[in-house]
Image: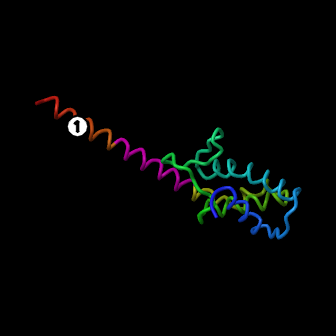
Amino acid sequence: MTGHDGLFALAKGKLNITWSDTGTDARLEAILNDTVPAVSNMVGLTYDYDEEEALDEAGEVFDYSLPSMERNLLLNYMAYEWNHQADIFRSAYWQEIAACRQRHTLLAEAAEESTDDTADDSTEETDGEDSE
């Protein structure tokens, strides 16, 4: 179970939706499509609207179908949306949102430092070759 279909199945389980009909599925699909970019923004991921996918700090696709704090937030946000209570989600989950956001900020900084170190190393090697 991966990707969008996996998330859809997880959301149905979270919401205890044991039936399938076009109206319910369409509403849940719409909530899922709106929730992924919203939660991505909340937790510090980048959302690529052209590709319709969340990206982590390394530019890799973030898979919400895998167990994570982000997935837990996504499914809980969907439950709040399902019950027309999204306006109180942030106040209920602010600590979890802040923890995810801080982690992604730190990972982005580490990735940036790693990139800077790699660039510095290649510059030093080039400088050494020029002096010969």
Question: Secondary structure under badge 1?
Answer: helix
Magenta region, residue range: 101-116
Q: Give the quarter of the figure containing the N terminus.
A: bottom right
Residue at the image point whose x is 26% and y is 35% from the top: 123
Is 117 located above or below residue 129 in the figure?
below
Residue 21 falls within the magenta-colored stretch? no
Residue at x-position 74% and y-position 50%: 33
Residue at image x 64%, y 38%?
50
Horizontal and vertical percent for residue 74? Answer: 68, 58
Where is the C terminus found, in terms of image quarters?
A: top left
User: Label 1 sits on what residue type?
Assistant: Glu
Q: Where is mark 1, residue-wise?
A: 124
Please name the colour scheme applied to the rendered image.
Answer: rainbow
> Residue drawn at (64%, 47%), measured in percent from left and top?
41
Judged left or right of residue 104, residue 49 is right
Residue 114 covered by magenta stretch: yes
Question: Which quadrant of the view contains residue 4?
Answer: bottom right
Secondary structure mostly taken by the magenta-highlighted segment of the chain: helix
